Image: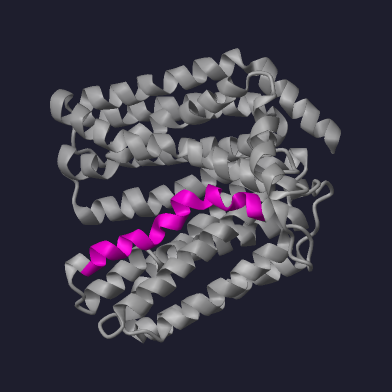
Amino acid sequence: MNSLMNLRVATILFLGFSSGLPLALSGGTLQAWLTVEGVDIETIGLFSLVGLPYTLKFLWSPLLDRFSFPLFGRRRGWILVFQSFLLILIFSMSLMSPTKVPWVLAFLAFGLAFASSSQDIVVDAYRAEVLREKERGLGAAVSVTGYRIAMLVSGALALILSEVLGWRSTYMIMAGLMVVGMIAAWLGPEPEDPGTPPRSMKEAVSEPLIEFFSRDGAWLMLALIVLYKLGDAFAGSLSTSFLLRGVGFSVGEVGVINKGMGLAATIVGALFGGALMARLGLYRSLLLFGILQAVSNLSFMVLAMVGKNYAMLVFTIAFENLAGGMGTAAFVAFLMVLCNHNFTATQFALLSALASLGRVYVGPVSGELVADLGWLVFFLITFLAAIPGLVLLWKMRGNIEALEKTVALQR
């Protein structure tokens, strides 16, 4: 692992932090600020719409493939531009009053979400282009680690600081933390293969799709993207409700063990999985970590059988988050391998949007299954939901290994 830690991987770690920091500042932390200041619930509900750019970012990703900022290379220039906007917007939000000018604050929060999702597009593209073959797993892992730490900083830590320093100072501090990512983008290396930008907007929009679907097994690759994390998304959709209502743990116990220890286990799993990928390769990592993800869902089923048992709770949360972190590292590396460097921004944005479909649509289905069948059968179904993705992965072994070899030869 030590041999893999270098400037490229370190840059990805801090850019992951830069990507994760703004999310809560236009989401959960902002909602807490509005609530504390006494803003009515209807207005708070409307504020949730400011996060819309995160779900639609693939619409303007071709622009970021087509055009380059004149300084700092094809990707780093845009990263620095969006980071500068983010710093200014977060600082400007600190000067606003939620009760006096709520719609000005909403406008700034929407701009924050737009700049943040745009930064994500270019950071994802840069990560896919700058990392060498053996570094992808660890690169994906440290990116997830930086992102999760930043969410903790702008979420839990920001709420604690707001009680001590007030909301204005808290948002000013968060704005200052954007400098961490700016330094990383400034000092980060250029990719060895940055790709060739599309020659026109028409090419920027159409060529990523034409290039992808010209590959053997393209539709099966898309199916694998949707199915690989489906069982994991199913189990996670109602895990908090299960721990509170299904087995009767307190909110504090769930907060400490599920959220606190769970976050630590996810980070450890991502880092361990990323390091292990350098030895196993992409296909074997996807298969092994996918199996562990599926089996970890069965630990929730065991917890549903034994009831309120603290030892089983700790084991379940640790196992599920370790496996999930390992699976996420392999899956992000898989998405990176799938991207052609001429169109990385567009292809990664589209593929990651497709991967999120499972998380979006399993929620309503999960609720119905629990109501009709109970928790024990529900978690058995989440295990079974993971199997089609693993079977498809096994059948596509040749495609994935050939893809990995092709990318390695290009380097």
Q: Nearer the viewer, residue 295 or 23?
A: 23
Q: Nearer the viewer, residue 57 or 271?
A: 57
Query: Which color mode does the image show?
Result: one colour
Q: Quadrant of the C terminus?
A: top right
Q: Is residue 56 magenta?
A: yes
Q: Quadrant of the N terminus?
A: top right
Rendering coords of residue 29 (x, y %): 35, 68
Residue at (38% x, 63% y) in the render:
50
Residue 302 sits above or below residue 61 on the image: above
Q: Is residue 17 magenta?
A: no
Residue at (49% x, 36% y) in the render:
355
For the question of whether residue 309 can be seen, the reply is yes
Residue at (74% x, 65% y) in the render:
69
Residue 179 sits above or below residue 202 on the image: below
Residue 45 sits above or below residue 274 on the image: below
Rendering coords of residue 221 (x, y %): 58, 25
**138 left or right of 355 in image:** right
- Residue span colored magenta: 43-63
Rendering coords of residue 360 (x, y %): 36, 40
